[in-house]
Amino acid sequence: MLNTIHLVLKIIPRKWLITLALIVMGLFSFLLLGVMSIFIAAMGGESGTDAGDITYTGEGQVMNVSPEVLKWEPTIRKHAKAFGVEPFVALMLAQMMQESGGRGSDPMQSSEGAFNTKYCKSPNCITDPDYSIWAGVQEFKHAIERAGVTSPGDMDHIKTALQAYNFGTGFFDFVNSNGGKYTKELAIKFSQEQYKKVAHTGMYHCLRPEAVPYQACYGDIVRP
């Protein structure tokens, strides 16, 4: 068998062998890149919620939220009606998409919020989705009131409210001390400063690749 292979190699011109080797290597590299791309996409889908394509119209409509989020619309509406913020249901759907993608037992990520008095204050401590939404709607109401939101179309103040929902109420004071209006740069700066204070705990990491170059790893700097 080896003799046959050696004979074939002697017969085939050297330049053809080089060309064949390059073709084989190219095919192998292409297949390897394909496998890696599939793996990375799968990992990305499991590690967080890519909500970058959410569109909130400001007129009570939201686009590009997942079925996992939409299934909670009746529950959000029930609590929103009880707390007087029903016109903002679409915005809360967008908020849930950003926070959890509608997955898990704490879809509004209310565990660390002020209105959670039943469960511990660590992330994802809440094990009852209805309670998570009940607390989250109140947290949302507090945020829009503190931000001075006047209507579902008041996007300038809504941006501050949504970011504070994620960062905590300290973001309101930070905005007021730095011009009084939300900007992406302010959100990044606040996240950077807070991350420096808690990085040693090992409990915080960048949720999205966009935050890594800034080391803005406290909370989520990607807001609607």
Image: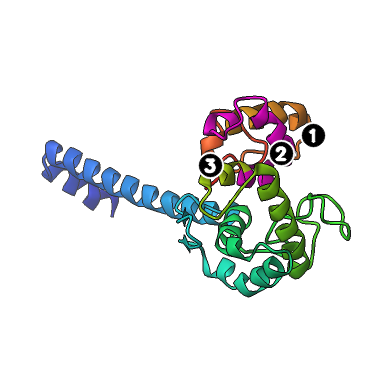
Residue type of the residue flagged with mark 1: Thr
Q: Which residue is mark 3?
A: 156
Decide which of tag 3 and tag 1 comes sooner along the chain: 3
Element on which disc 2 rests: loop
What residue is at 65 percent from the left and 43 percent from the top? 147
The image shows residue 33, relative to residue 131, as above or below, that is above
Q: With 153 as the anchor, is 150 left or right in this view? A: right
Q: Give the magenta part as a residue range.
A: 161-186
Q: Nearer the viewer, mark 3 or mark 1?
A: 3
Q: With 104 as the anchor, is 48 left or right in this view? A: left
Mark 1 vs 2: CB contact within 8 A = yes
What residue is at 13 percent from the left and 36 percent from the top? 15
Q: Is residue 205 magenta?
A: no
Element on which disc 1 rests: helix
What residue is at 78 percent from the left and 66 percent from the top? 131
- Residue 92, given in percent of the width and then of the height, sits at 61, 59
Decide which of tag 3 and tag 2 comes sooner along the chain: 3
Q: Quadrant of the N terminus?
A: bottom left
* Picture colour scheme: rainbow
Mark 3 vs 1: CB contact within 8 A = no
Q: Nearer the viewer, residue 190 or 106?
A: 190
Neighbourhood count class around disc 1 (C-alpha, 10 Å): few under 14, some 14–19, many 20 upward: few
Residue type of the residue flagged with mark 2: Tyr
Neighbourhood count class around disc 3 (C-alpha, 10 Å): few under 14, some 14–19, many 20 upward: some
Q: Which residue is mark 1?
A: 201
Quote the CA–CA distance across marks 3 and 1. Answer: 34 Å
- Residue 197, given in percent of the width and then of the height, sits at 76, 27
Q: Which residue is mark 2?
A: 204
